[in-house]
Image (cartoon, helix red, strand yellow):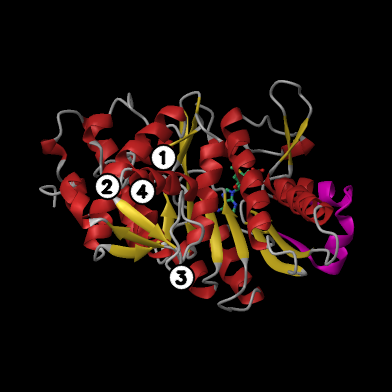
Amino acid sequence: MVKSKDAFSWTDGKRPVCPIHSQVKLDILRSYIEAYFSTVAANPVIPAVNIHFVDAFAGGGIFTDPITRGPISGSPFVMLNTVHGSQQTINAGRTTNKLEIRAKYHFADLSRSAISELTRGIQASEYAPLLGTGDIQVDRMAFDEYLPRLLQRIPSHEKTKAIFFLDQCGWNIATLDHCNAILRHLPKAEIIWNISVESLAMFANDNPDFRKGIKRFGVDLGDAFTNQASFNHFSDWRKALVAIFLDAIRKGCVAKYVSPFMVQHDGWGYWLLHLSNHPQANNVMKATHWLHQNNSLHEGFAGLKMLEFNRNNFNQATMFRFDQAASEATQEALVEQLCPRISEMGGETTVEQLIESVANETPADRSRLYLALDALRSDGELRIRGPKDEKRQKTPQSQNDRLILNTTKQRFFVGFG
Ligand SMILES: C[S@@+](CC[C@H](N)C(=O)[O-])C[C@H]1O[C@@H](n2cnc3c(N)ncnc32)[C@H](O)[C@@H]1O
């Protein structure tokens, strides 16, 4: 296996080949940024969006395509090009009140050659003037040192928008403690965080060095280290440890919403976690994974048990791949599980409250939740009403719509409580 730090080397002006699993990650970043702006600037009277983009493991900017041998944009250029393209697309659909995206870019990397290639690439591009105005800042710095400086540069404010891309090699350079520091400083920030499950699983053991790495990362795995005897195979213990690690991230993270999905291609797998405090951001990232079906996956269940450890899935035979089968399994599970959840919430709730309640438990995006609610409505399990008690004939029309269980139809979940 090529070590990722060797694979990502821009030494002597060479452009490393971009493996397909990394291209998938860049595609997800691109789709997410596009969907982000169409969501935050959906209202045509919004004249401007101020936002910071942070790429703290930026690399050298340009890769080589393994098939065509031509250039491929790395994450800094994906950010620059997608922001530029999003502004043009949104403005093409607006007649008055054009949108201005006022973005500031913060790019950093530890590698001297990556930073000099990146700087050279930006200087030779249409974005060169942004270096002069300070809207693009490029630093050669290790992440540990860079993050506190960056957080001094961006004043703490509850409304400051920021997208952090933490595309580290391995799993514990950008840690949970770092992510929590970012979200405490900038509660509206979102973090797209690459954690190499491959390295984590490969190095997982009960030795002091690994334990130290876990401690530095900021999670407590309790007795997961010492319960090896309860597993038939060492590899099963490792997989369980990794699943517990993911659960510990979700529990220890200050973000309200964590999308815990993986990207996998040709046997390579890594988590591309998304942390945010906003249900809409969580929904946009889930919808992005549904767009990238087959390469996006998760190891848990459909429906509302997304993070429950699936011991039967060790051979990954029933992996959830955000494809048609996953969509059907999601629908089936939600149709069974949503009414019991609404019952626990008092038998009546708003769409917004239901989404907040289930967001961390399901891979379903809002459109799939709405489909399940529509199926329950047409089966007579629940009623959907507008704020003025208007009867909805199909899916909810707004987040404020109320969902009311039909008490006469509760046979569905009686006995499962
Ligand atoms: C996966 S590559 C980044 C690729 C880039 N995000 C892209 O998609 O175009 C990881 C980068 O992290 C850098 N790196 C490794 N250790 C680092 C550290 N401690 N702090 C900052 N950067 C580091 C490497 O030099 C490498 O360029």
- Find the distance from the CA under tag 1 to the CA under tag 2: 30 Å
Q: Residue at x 56, y 70 (%)?
A: 148
Q: Mark 2 and mark 4: span between their CA atoms?
A: 14 Å
Label 1: state its secondary structure: helix
Look at the numbered discs 2 and 4 and tell me whether their residues touch, using CB distance below 8 Å.
Answer: no
Q: What residue is pinned by disc 4?
A: 377
**Is label 3 in a helix, a strand or a loop?**
loop
Determine whether, in the image, residue 210 is placed left or right of residue 119: left
Q: Nearer the viewer, mark 1 or mark 2?
A: 2
Point out residue 226 in the picture as x, y percentages from the top left corner. 16, 46
The numbered dot on residue 388 is: 3
Q: Secondary structure at mark 2?
A: helix
Q: Earlier in the sequence, mark 4 or mark 1?
A: 1
Q: Which residues are magenta?
A: 119-139
Is residue 383 magenta-colored? Answer: no
Is residue 290 left or right of 39 when viewed as pictured? left
Badge 1 is on which residue? 197
| Label 4 packing within 10 angstroms: few (<14), some (14-19), many (20+) | many
Q: Disc 4 or disc 1, which is closer to the eye?
A: 4
Which sits in the foreground, 134 or 278? 278
Q: Residues within 10 Å of mark 2 (few under 14, many from 20)?
A: some
User: Which callout, 4 or 3, points at the residue further toward the start of the chain?
Assistant: 4
* First of labels 2, 3 by sequence position: 2
Residue 337 is labelled as 2
Of all residues, the one furthest to the top in this rendering is 67
Mark pair 4, 1: CA separation: 41 Å
